[in-house]
Image (cartoon, helix red, strand yellow):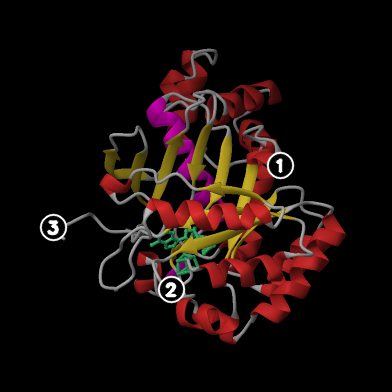
Amino acid sequence: MKILSGLTQSELEQLTDNLGASRFRARQIHNWIYLKSVKSIDEMTDLSVKFRDELKKSAVVSDTKIKVKQVSSDGTIKYLLEYPDGECVETVLMRFDNRANLTACVSSQVGCAVNCTFCATGKRGFIRNLTYKEIIEQVLTIQRDTGLKVTNVVFMGQGEPLLNLDNVLKAMEMFNEDFQIGARRLTVSTSGIIPQMIKLADLDMQSTLALSLHAPNHDIRLKLMPVESKYNMDELHKALKYYVDKTGRRITIEYLLIKDLNDTIDSAKQLAQYLKDIKCNINLIPYNPTEKNDYKRPSNNSIMKFKSLMEHSGKKVTVRLERGADIDAACGQLRGKVDTVK
Ligand code: SAH
Ligand code: SF4
């Protein structure tokens, strides 16, 4: 059986050619899959019943299942998807105040090898890469299930996108061309895999790159993220400069705030110094609790204090709204399992 989701226009044309149908049919199927997001071939009502029956003999829309769907009190929806081999990942749909903006947070891998100490995904270890089809399938699932069109995609679910770069780039190309989501509405978040950051710079990527920095100095970062022993903050600084110079784009610096660990005035000063000559926005992420560690979320007061210190250094600073924490859909809480009693 052919799976229609994930096929490009020219692949769909091959399919209609094989069925002896005109290429206009391929265009129609393409629209039904990516823009109108139907669940079945029967819903493709501008195709003749005869052609639909023909198509159904050799193709289905999707082979991915929604295993669990949870809706948060703030409207965030978390899906646990199951691929045909039985592996599962989460994908999250966030609606912000402005209802026209629908952001999908997609996974790029099952599990993650980077093993940051604060992250539930990292605790699972690395299972496998997702193919580009499995990545875009997450957005298609959301669109099919809600009947809404996703407008923004962030690679902030399970996995380190830059360790699965070919599939991530291909998925981004399809988001752009097939889903008609503008490049600037796509964000890739990385723990700082330097060679691939350089590659993105050389590709002149027009989407947003977000770096999970999370620390003001080497020692603190090493405690939080083992990747610091391979790609340290000095090297990262050079890579950030290279990226900004090459692409002309502003980078987003993600900074996890953990009580008494990296939320102090001293930390804010060191961070400001580190970012002094980097064109960036700063996104502060108050720590979301995950199982089995001693980290704590700072008080709102210290979050605001940290924010204003960074603003004084001349940066634009936002605090990431916590979305979907009641259903473990917030940053760092994805672990690819059905939730059991905690
Ligand atoms: N692997 C990539 C993208 C996925 S994680 C990366 O690390 O950048 C998306 C963001 O959620 C990252 O900035 C990550 O550091 C953050 N995150 C992980 N665990 C978290 C937690 N417990 N609380 C808040 N943010 C967390
Ligand atoms: Fe992997 Fe990102 Fe989690 Fe670190 S924070 S373990 S890089 S998913």
Q: Residue 3 location, x and y as percent?
A: 49, 42
> Where is the N terminus found, in terms of image quarters?
top left
Category of crowding for the residue at label 3, using alpha-carbon neighbours closer than 10 angstroms: few (below 14), some (14–19), many (at least 20): few
| Quadrant in the picture for residue 190 | bottom right
- Magenta stretch encompasses residue 196: no
Residue beneath label 3, please? 341
Residue in view at x 38 percent, y 60 percent: 298
Under mark 2, the amino acid is: Leu
Report if the CB atoms under discs 3 and 1 are less than 8 Å apart. no
> Where is the C terminus found, in terms of image quarters?
bottom left
Category of crowding for the residue at label 1, using alpha-carbon neighbours closer than 10 angstroms: few (below 14), some (14–19), many (at least 20): some
Q: CA distance from mark 3 to mark 1?
A: 40 Å
Q: Residue 31 location, x and y as percent?
A: 60, 25
Residue in view at x 52 percent, y 20 percent: 51
Which badge, 1 or 2, comes first in the chain's sequence?
1
Q: Which mark is residue 183?
A: 1
Q: Is residue 191 above or below residue 157?
A: below
Under mark 1, the amino acid is: Ala
Residue beneath label 2, please? 261
Secondary structure at badge 1 equals helix
Of marks 1 and 2, the one in the foreground: 2
Under mark 3, the amino acid is: Val
The answer as to whether callout 2 falls within 8 Å of ligand 1 is: no
